[in-house]
Image (cartoon, helix red, strand yellow):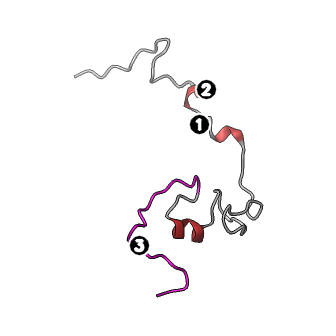
Amino acid sequence: QNVVADVWKDGARNANNKKSTRNTLLKTNKSFAPGLKTCKICKSKLHQPGAYCIECAFLKGICTMCGVQIADLKFDKRRLDGP
């Protein structure tokens, strides 16, 4: 058995082209500054990127980043003050 290296051709996927292998999302340099954004519901300061704080998102059953409903709360009684 002879192992032959792939011959490079234009448009080959195995080429070491640095432009195509970079993650373009990392190039934007948008960093999160903790404490600058506030929760849309309770107006408390956020310490991670998103629109809602952890407590409000848990009580409403929504995503902290985008606010999409992720939990069905029909038969659920969520409270922070305990039972």
Nearer to us: label 2 or label 1: 1
- Residues marked 1 and 3 touching at CB (< 8 Å): no
Mark 2 — residue? 19
Q: In the rendered view, does 6 fall on the left or right side of 68?
A: left
Q: Amino acid at mark 3?
A: Asp
Q: In the rendered view, does 1 fall on the left or right side of 27?
A: left
Q: Relative to 63, does residue 29 appear above or below in the rendering?
A: above
Are there few (<14), some (14-19), or many (20+) residues within 10 Å of tag 1? few
* Spatial separation of the CA atoms under disc 1 and disc 3: 41 Å
Nearer to us: label 3 or label 2: 3
Mark 1 — residue? 23
Q: In the rendered view, does 14 fall on the left or right side of 23?
A: left
**Magenta-colored stretch includes residue 30:** no
Please tell me the numbered disc located at residue 76. 3
Q: Amino acid at mark 1?
A: Asn
Q: Nearer the viewer, residue 60 or 64?
A: 60
